Each structure stands twice: as C-alpha cells, then as structure tokens.
Amino acid sequence: MAWQEVVGHEAQIDRFRRNLRSGRLASAFLFVGPDGIGKQLFARKLTQTLFCEVNPEYECNPCGQCPVCLQVIKGTHPDLHYVELLPGTAEIRTAQIVGGAIRINDKEEQFPGVCYEVNLKPIRARRKVVIINDADSLNNTSTANLLKTLEEPPPGAVMILLGTSLSQQLDTIISRCQILSFNALLPEQIQQILLQQQVVDDPNEALELAMIANGSVGLARRYSESDLLETRRELLGLLTALPQQAEKLSAMVIGLVDGKSLSRREKMDQLDFLTSIVVTCFHQVALQLSGQPPSGDPVLIDVSRQIASAWPGDVETALACIDRTLETAYHGRANANVKTLVEVWVDDLSQIWLTGGFKLPT
C-alpha cells in the first residue's frame, strides 16, 4: 500500500477514501499546513490513487509499483503538471500559469502554462492533475488567471494547491477550493520517517533531530546535514550548570546569533532555534517538578533530570524561565540589541535558578 509512506495524516486519507468510494471528488483542493510535513507527498500519493493501473481509484489504494505510479513519484507522468517557485524567484510567475517566456539564468524559456495544459485531453490517465506548490507565492496576476480554471475546470481534472495557511491565500482562491488542514508532525512520527527514509540510522539521533524540527520532516532532514545537533548538545550541557556557566552560555549564543556574515533574518532564525531548545528543556524540568515523567530524546531527558534534581525553586519558577526565554525571542525580532538582549536573558535565568525567582529591587 503506497499510503504507508504518509505518516501523521490518516484523517485526510480517510476523507479521500470516503469521497472516492462515494464517487464524489471535488475538482480543486487547498492543502494548508507548515512546510515540510508531507503535503507534497500526500498530493503525489493522491495522484497515484487517481492514475494507478492496478487498483481502481475508488479503492484509494494505489499499488505504488506499476509504471504509472512510478512516473507520478518521479514527476514524469504526462498527465501530472507541477508548478513551483523557479530558482532565484520569490513568486510564481504568470507565464507558469497561462504560458509565456521567462528568463532563467540568462536564458529565455517558454512555458505552456498549466491553465492550457490542464485543458488538453489526457494522454495516459483518465484525468489531468495539477499540483501547485508554494501557492502562498502566487502573485495577483497569476491568481487572477488561475481563478477561471478553478471555477470551471475541465471534466475530471483535479487541481491541488499547497500553502502554509489560509491567511496567505486570497478569499477568491479559498472560496473555489475544498480546504484540507495538515498539522505539524509529532516527534515520534518524524523519528519514524527519518528512520524509514534512512536519513539517519540511529533511533536516538533521529529523535534528537525530531525534537528540534518543530514538526517538520523537511527541517529535520536539513538539520541532519548540519552541525546543529552538536550545537544543541553543547547548549543543553551548559544549562545543567547555568549559574556557573552563565558567561560561557552568553558567549556561545552571541557567537552563533550575532555573526557579521549573517543577515538579520538569519540571526533571528538562529535565536529562535536556540531559545526553542531552552524552552523545551525547561518544559521537561517543569514536568518533573510536578511529578510527571520526562519525555523526548535521551540527551534532553538526562539534562532535564540533572536540572530538576538541582532546582531550588518550584514549578512556577521553571515556568518563569520559559516565559523569560519566549520574551527574549520576541524582543529579538523587535530589533533589540542582540548582545545586550542575550546577556540580560542569561543573567535572569541564572538569577531565577539561584534565588528561586526574580529578586525584586528594594
């Protein structure tokens, strides 16, 4: 069963299974959810369901192995048309939707446009399917040209738009599509996918990556190719003796966040990454202080246990560390001075640890 590769979206599979069994399949869908959680894979698996030469589509069970199913995954099926951001562009060009020329790397390329392609007679399948990735990046002209096709699609055609949230879409797009929401994946689900796809071999490493990926397999896969796991381990190690390591922790965070070669956005992404590690750690500390067992990867569990065993305060003081860290991340995005911001944040965490709360001025 080809759907077994799709993890964490069983409710959406069931919805299409019911629709196909009843013979009621809409012509336009908008899949919304965070990047990297499997929306694109889901769209291709749905296309396999509609095209498969072995199993009829009403079974919603593509074989995944016939020549047609393999063509869909490779993106070479003549009746599957795929639109995404071109390299070096920030929006989907009008020519990709209605046809025309686009200059790419100093070379002009002609695009037939998906609105034209979807109206052609299917070559091999019984219907045409269009997948528009990065639908958040449709400009106003592209959207205007797409609306007529969404409103009056050719018989049997299915159009699937992939976006991150409804707030990024125009009302005219939303009103013409059936909406399917996709949630971020659980760490255990990301761990399963990373091992299944052989991104990593070690289950503990897979879980570590999942813990820092914010529900996104795509992020976890990118992190596996970087040294961010080592950064996380170093940061967690410093947290175990925060009052004695405050200066070292500040220097580490400032060095990672305030590099001259980093853009403002890259600096804030780094700060978000580091503060999210601290928030997750103190959340585990708070759980243990309230008598609940910790969860997560072995590194996180070990560090949070060490902190909880040495913690002089109560659950509220651990939660205060979370609040203070989230406040730091917020002010970082408000153009605060990064060096001062980090130093004050780490000093406040140390004070909470040593005194069991903030020491109010007298």
Image: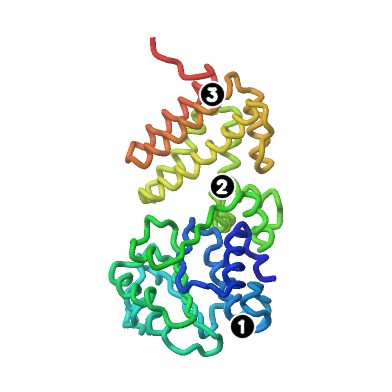
To which quarter of the image does residue 315 belong?
top right
Task: Find numbered disc 1 in the image and state the secondary structure of the residue it sits on.
Answer: helix
Give how far apart the Cα atoms at labels 2 and 1 are: 37 Å
53 on left or right of 126: right
Instruction: Mark 3: give few (<14), some (14-19) or many (20+) Cα within 10 Å.
Output: some
**Which mark lies nearer to you, 3 or 2?**
3
Quarter in which the C terminus is drawn: top left
From the image, tell me which residue sits under label 2. 212
112 on left or right of 127: left
Which label belongs to residue 316? 3
Instruction: Mark 2: give few (<14), some (14-19) or many (20+) Cα within 10 Å.
Output: many
Q: What's the residue at 38%, 50% (across, down)?
A: 265
278 on left or right of 197: left
Instruction: Work out whether mark 1 precedes mark 3 in sequence or the reverse, and give the earlier one.
Output: 1
Badge 1 amino acid? Val
Give how far apart the Cα atoms at labels 3 and 2 are: 24 Å
Instruction: Mark 1: give few (<14), some (14-19) or many (20+) Cα within 10 Å.
Output: many
Give how far apart the Cα atoms at labels 1 and 3 are: 58 Å
Badge 3 amino acid? Glu
Q: What's the residue at 68%, 76% (across, down)?
A: 63
From the image, tell me which residue sits under label 1. 68
Q: What's the residue at 46%, 68% (across, down)?
A: 29
Mark 3 near mark 2, Cβ–Cβ under 8 Å? no
Q: Please name whichever residue, 231 or 147, is drawn nearer the observer in this view of the structure.
A: 147
Task: Find numbered disc 3 in the image and state the secondary structure of the residue it sits on.
Answer: helix
Quarter in which the N terminus is drawn: bottom right
**Which mark lies nearer to you, 2 or 1?**
1
